[in-house]
Amino acid sequence: MDTSKFSVSTNLKQQRKQKGRNLARHDRDVKMINSGSLGPKRLVMNIAIDLQEMCPELSDQDAQKMALGYCILNYGTN
């Protein structure tokens, strides 16, 4: 039995799932940015909290800097 077609099909499905999750996250982030004058700040703080949940040893200041960098790289400075 040739399993190469199966693994390619499975890999393609996983890539599509990941792409869908990434697009959904981007849509949520843009919606939050556009939610009001504090939208960008809210997004940075939420990302900082997510980072601290993944890496509890991060200080508040380091997590906020990392989150701000992420937002600048992905959504610009405007």
Image (cartoon, rainbow, N blue to C red):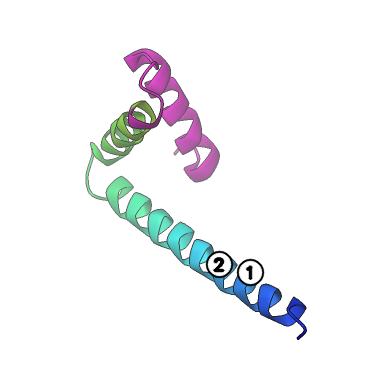
Inter-mark Cα distance, 2 to 1: 5 Å
Q: Which residue is mark 1?
A: 11
Which three-letter amino acid code belongs to the residue tagged 2?
Answer: Gln
Residue 66: in magenta span: yes
Spot occupied by residue 16 in the image (x, y as percentages of width and height): 55, 70
Point out the image quarter for the C terminus. Answer: top left
Residue beneath the point at 32% across and 16% down:
60
Residue at (35% x, 26% y) in the render: 52
Query: Residue placed farthest to the bottom in the image?
Result: 1
- Which of 47/37 is in front? 47
For the stretch drawn in magenta, what is the main secondary structure?
A: helix
Q: Quadrant of residue 1?
A: bottom right
Residue 19 or 55: which is nearer the viewer? 55
The vertical placement of 10 against 52, above or below, is below
Q: Tell me: residue 6, above or below residue 66.
A: below
Toward which corner of the image does residue 13 lie, by quadrant? Answer: bottom right
Helix, strand or loop at mark 2: helix
Please state the horizontal and vertical placement of residue 37, each as a whole percent of the image: 23, 39
Which residue does the numbered mark 2 point to in the structure image?
14
Question: Dot 2, crowdedness within 10 Å: few (<14), some or many (≥20)?
Answer: few
Residue kind at label 1, given as amino acid type: Asn
Determine which of the numbered discs, if any, sits on residue 74 in the image: none
Q: Residue at x 29, y 36 (%)?
A: 46
| Location of residue 38 in the rendering, given as x and y in whole percent from the top left corner | 23, 36
- Marks 2/1 in contact by CB < 8 Å: the verdict is yes
Say which quarter of the image contains residue 2: bottom right
Q: Is residue 44 visible?
A: yes
**Residue 39, placed above or below residue 55:** below
Query: Would residue 78 appear left or right of 48 to someone viewing this image?
Result: right
First to last magenta residue range: 53-78
